[in-house]
Image (cartoon, rainbow, N blue to C red):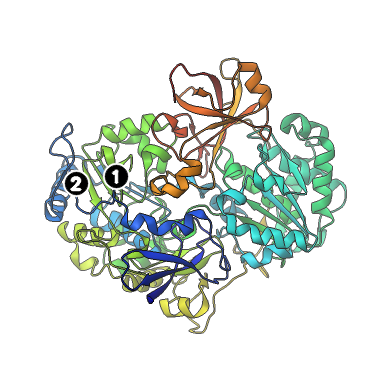
Amino acid sequence: MIKSATQTHCPYCALQCGMQLIKREGLLDLEVAPRNFPTNKGGLCQKGWSATELLTHPERLTTPLMRDTKDAPLRPVSWDEALTRITQEIQQLQQAHGKDAIGVFGGGGLTNEKVYLLGKFARVALGTRQIDYNGRFCMSSAAAAGNRAFGIDRGMPFPLEDIPKADTLFLIGANPAETMPPLMQYFDAQRQRGGALIVADPRRTPTAQSATLHLQLTPGTDTALLLGLLHLILAEGWADLDYIATRTTGVAEVQRTVAAYWPERVERITGVPTCRLQEAARLLGVASTAMTLMARGAEQQSKGVDNALASINLMLALGQVGKLGGGWGTITGQGNGQGGREHGQKTDQLPGYQPLTNPQARERIAALWGVTPESLPQPGLSAYELLDALGTETGPKALLVFGSNLVISAPRAAHIEAKLKSLDLLVVADFFLSETAQIADIVLPVAQWAEETGTMTNLEGRVLLRQRAQLPPEGVKTDAEVLIALAERLGHAERFPTSEPEAVFTELGQATSGAPADYSGITYEKIRAQDGVFWPCPSDDPKHPGTPRLFTGNFAHADGRARFHAIAHSASAEEPDDAFPLYLTTGRVMQQYQSGTQTRRVASLNTTAGEGFVELHPTLARQFGIVNGQSIKVITRRGEATVPARVTATIRPDTIFLPFHYAGRQRANLLTNPALDPTSKMPEFKVCAARIEPALIKN
């Protein structure tokens, strides 16, 4: 017999699939049940179906842990002892080295309420400018491009239901068949109505295998590919000249730039045959509705912003942005990847996507928070720059980490691990002893998704409500309760009156009123009634339903027009050479998620994907005498990983692939290049030079 049923959402990716959590009479565990929510329509992937297993996992943390000295083991302590020591060390370090001696690192999986509190805590309770988050490693390139081209960043400026309406759908660096399986129903519907699917990816992924046309480009050549397609579209007369004239600016310089990217030249750069370039351009050019969706493959590069802008140029030239069934968007990765970058944990932003450097925004937020505008810090370092500065003379001496596992997820991971170990104080809030928590001085046990209520903003810009299904275990606090407790001990209790989620969300709404990401007209009640609310949703009209589609009339720039940007192809920060002759790229597998802190603890997921691997082409395997399953070393200028070989013809012969979920010697980010995009500060996770050799030890 069902005792209760809670309507909520999956704890993993930005699709935020609706689900029910069922509590049955006489049973302790929650049971996952489908929910006919608009995004997933009852579908869930393996990760979603098994998500409740983590709530009662034997490795669950239920008491704070602390080291007495750097060399001492972690031992259980009371909350009072842990919070007292954190407070004392923060005060001592700031007295000795200044406010910026304390850094804060957040995560794209935190609820909007916790994101808002984290940014407020850093700037008010700590007074530090050193705050950033792991979404810098995920969405920053697409966000920067959206802001430049459209005047606003909402990763997908239309609802998922528009995807099947596209005559031609172009995916760049995206593999939703493995990363977001329930999303594939929209692509299936698009093909069933006769639509064409183009996929650009160095690997013939499960998504690419279902495509009408696969463009198997050389890693790091996305810009050249996109410029070549725009060259053909302009040359063949497929551009929408009326749209360009009335709704955009800057096309003339783009026309001059793309003239140099004729098909034969683009083939030499990208490895994509001229005939395939021409077919892709035709499919896009003759389509009544065409849509481009990007993801991390093209964005996690030192030129990720250029890649995104080049793809936006393509859709603007075709007159598709703002058209029903057409447009440009990015497939956000982390559960709250969209909301996570909107409400203040990003180093250069105040809530609602307001620039921290904007005097009017500073004045408004300062008044709401009860502080002076002058007291709000200016922007600090971006995520990797912040981590790289840890422990230096001018960098933070302490770091508070919420919702991130940096030892696994940061590029040049061994270097960052050493930086974390060098700190005077490392505090990690988590529900498991992640690889980062294992080296912390203090570990704080916090609630999981089903044990707290809060909002998330999914990949469409739809604000959703995750509702609590049960209380956390005894001894566990929410992240919000931790922040409030620390703020009180630091002397700022009056500015942090509550950790209650709905009250925090109300304050968040006030902070975002009139801002680009305006949540002021959204309430928990409205979210429940409407199956989520799309921002912007201003409060001047109490009946405002939200805005599912942006750009139908105007863009967010002052003149209402979108901006073309003249882009040229440039080489990746690190190209193969004699010493490191291969391209290395990284990504995900279906059964694992992000750093694996959660999914690597689920037995059913580990049965099929419990260890890392390296994909390599049969030609490359024969060259090195490697057989399937053999343990091999993958080596770059930053380190080496040891993983079993997976020989497959679905990857380019000059390219190898590692998933990034695994720990120890299988850590892909031991190898990756921290070269940063100059605008977004995104590290180049997706391209670097590597070599392989047989391992002398068993994996």
Is 410 above or below relative to 249? above
Query: Looking at this view, is 472 or 220 the one in front?
Result: 472
Mark 1–mark 2 CB contact (< 8 Å)? yes
Q: Quadrant of the C terminus?
A: top left
Location of residue 507 (image quadrant): bottom left
| Residue 671 can be seen in this image | yes
Q: Quadrant of the N terminus?
A: bottom left
Location of residue 453 (image quadrant): bottom left
The answer to whether 655 appears left or right of 632 in the picture is right
Residue 314 x, y percent position in the rendering = 73, 51
Location of residue 188 (image quadrant): bottom right
Residue 75 x, y percent position in the rendering = 15, 43
Q: Earlier in the sequence, mark 1 or mark 2?
A: 2
Is 682 above or below relative to 14? above
* Label 1 CA crowd tier, 10 Å (few <14, some 14–19, many 20+): many
- Residue located at (44% from left, 31% from top): 666
Is 509 above or below relative to 699? below
- Residue located at (16% from left, 53% from top): 83
Q: Secondary structure at mark 2?
A: strand
Query: Looking at this view, is 560 or 350 the one in front?
Result: 350
* Label 2 CA crowd tier, 10 Å (few <14, some 14–19, many 20+): many
Mark 1: amino acid:
Leu
Query: Looking at this view, is 665 or 497 the one in front?
Result: 665
Report the residue marked by disc 1.
433
- Residue located at (31% from left, 65% from top): 28
Disc number for residue 65: 2
Mark 2: amino acid:
Leu
Residue 585 x, y percent position in the rendering = 57, 34
- Residue located at (45% from left, 44% from top): 606
